[in-house]
Image (tube, rainbow, N blue to C red):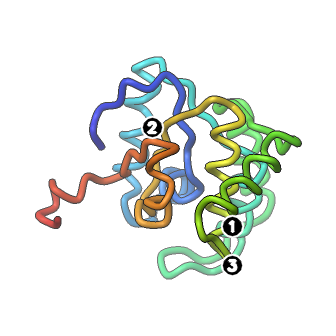
Amino acid sequence: MAMTSARRVFVDTNVLTRATIASAPLHLEAIENLARLRRMDVELWISHQVIREYVANATRPQQYSPPIAIEQVLDQVRRFREQFKLAENTTAVLENLLALIDEFPTGGKQVHDANIVATMLAYGIDTLITHNVEDFRRFESKITIAPLVDERLLGRT
């Protein structure tokens, strides 16, 4: 991940999942990038949506992991609430979401991505760290996307 000058970074669910499940692909990259951002005194943010998505991901079978026991998942969520700033769903988030849907053709599962961007805008967070860069590309005029892994370093373009 390229170094960021951002003071506040929103952490996508896929980064949290990779950082907390040792068998997940890019586990070390996720841990290293979050640690790097913390060393840079960057505020790391998540939202209620990210917590819900994390619980859903962690408690269902994945190609890299069986379901995690709910007790462990709830313990992890408690740690998230200590380690990250928590952006709540507010009227401003909803208004931003509706404006984004109006401005950018969005539907189906893409609404979840738009809601992350809406949350970021409501809380003045301009940078998102994610592995799913393409899912957010449509919003590049509104946010900065920090890839979990710089594809150029992997020989991809």
Left or right: residue 80 compared with residue 157: right
Residue extending furthest right? 91
Q: Which residue position holds label 3?
A: 108
Looking at the rendered structure, the kind of residue marked 3 is Gly
Q: Position of residue 78 (x, y in %)?
A: 77, 41
Please name the residue shown 49% across and 43% down the image: 143
* Left-right relation of 1 to 98: left
Q: Is residue 157 left or right of residue 3?
A: left
Q: Quadrant of the N terminus?
A: top left
Q: Amino acid at mark 2?
A: Leu
Q: Earlier in the sequence, mark 2 or mark 3?
A: 2
Q: What residue would you read off at disc 1?
A: 111
Looking at marks 2 and 1 on the same chain, the residue that comes earlier in the sequence is marked by 2
Helix, strand or loop at mark 1: helix
Residue 83 point in image, percent of width and height:
64, 31
Q: Give the vertical position of 7 relative to 86 (above or below).
A: above
Where does the C terminus fall, quadrant-wise?
bottom left
